[in-house]
Image (cartoon, grey):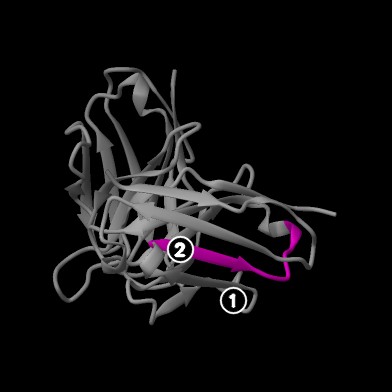
Amino acid sequence: EVQLLESGGGLGQPGGSLRLSCAASGFTFNNYAMNWVRQAPGKGLEWILSISGSGNYTHYADSVKGRFTISRENSRSTLYLQMNNLRAEDTATYYCAKSGKTVWSMDYWGQGTLVTVSS
Amino acid sequence: EIVMTQSPVSLPVTPGEPASISCRSSQSLLAFNGYNYLDWYLHKPGQSPQLLIYSGSNRVSGVPDRFSGSGSGTDFTLRISAVEAEDVGVYYCMQTLQTPLTFGGGTKVEIK
C-alpha cells in the first residue's frame, strides 16, 4: 500500500525557514517523480515544485523560485521541501504527491501538513 | 503558463441526477503522441485530493464508473452520470503538459 507521510509543518516566522519531509513507502521511490502542492486557506490547489525520480531534474513555480528547494533522498525514500524567506502568503497546507499514470499526474497524496507564517 | 478555467464555480446537485463540469485551457493539451495531458481530481472535505481521471478520459482503478472524462485540445468535461452523496467536494482539472503545472480554480459540488 502506497503511503506518504508529511511532517515538519508548524509556525514559521516571516523571513524564516522551515523544512518539510515526506516519508514514502509501498512503492519503488526512485522510480517516480514527486511533487509538492499547496492549498492556502479558502483557496484552490497550487502546484509549486516537482522533482524527477533520480533527483536530477527539478521544476519550480515562480511563486517559490529562489526561496524553496525540493530534494529527495532515495536511500531513505524521503522527499524534502526546504522553505526559506517565508512570507505570509506561504501559509497553506502542503501536500506531497507521487507522480504516476503520466509523467506528472499525481496518483497518491499525503495527508498534508499545515504551515502558518506569522510573527 | 497554461491557464485553466473551470465552470461552474459552484454546482448544487440532486442525488441520482447527472452533473457535468467544464474545463478549458489557454492552449491545446493534445501532445504529439495523441494524448491529452489533462487530469481531474476530487478534494473531499477533510481528505487529501484524489486522482479520478488522467489523460483526459482514463479513469483511475477503483473510481466508480459513474465518473467519465471527455474532450480534447482545449475543452474538457467531467461527467457524473448519477451523483451520490459521497461525491461532494471540490473538483479540479489540472494540465500536465508542461510546467508550471496548473490547476483550474475548482468546482464545488454540493447536494441540494
Give the magenta part as a residue range.
A77-88
Seen from this angle, which residue lies furthest left? B34
Residue at the front extreme of this rendering: A75
Residue B11, percent from left and from top: 43, 31
Mark toward the viewer: 1 or 2:
2
Question: Label 1: which residue?
Answer: A65
Tell me: A102 left or right of B102. Answer: left
Label 1 crowding class (10 Å Cα cut-off): few <14, some 14-19, many 20+? few
**CA separation, marks 1 and 2?**
18 Å
Mark number for residue A79? 2
Mark 2 secondary-structure assignment: strand
Q: Residues within 10 Å of mark 2 (few under 14, many from 20)?
A: many
Q: Which residue is nearer to you in this view: A103 or B58?
A: A103
Residue at 52%, 58% in the rendered image? A21
Question: SS class of the residue under badge 1?
Answer: loop
In magenta stretch: residue A81: yes
Give the image location of residue B78, x and y in percent.
28, 43
Whether residue A86 is in magenta: the answer is: yes
The quadrant where residue A42 appears: top right
A72 displayed left or right of A31: right
Residue depicted at 29% across the width and 65% down the height: A32
Given the image, on which type of amino acid does mark 2 rest?
A: Leu
The residue at the point 78 percent across, 68 percent down is: A15
Q: Nearer the viewer, residue B112 or A91?
A: A91
Is residue A12 positioned above or below A50 on the image? Answer: above
Residue extending furthest toward the right: A119
* Position in image of residue A20 (x %, y %): 57, 59
Which chain contains the residue that carries disc 2? A
Residue at left offset 22%, top offset 46%: B69
> What amino acid type should be assigned to the residue bearing mark 1?
Lys
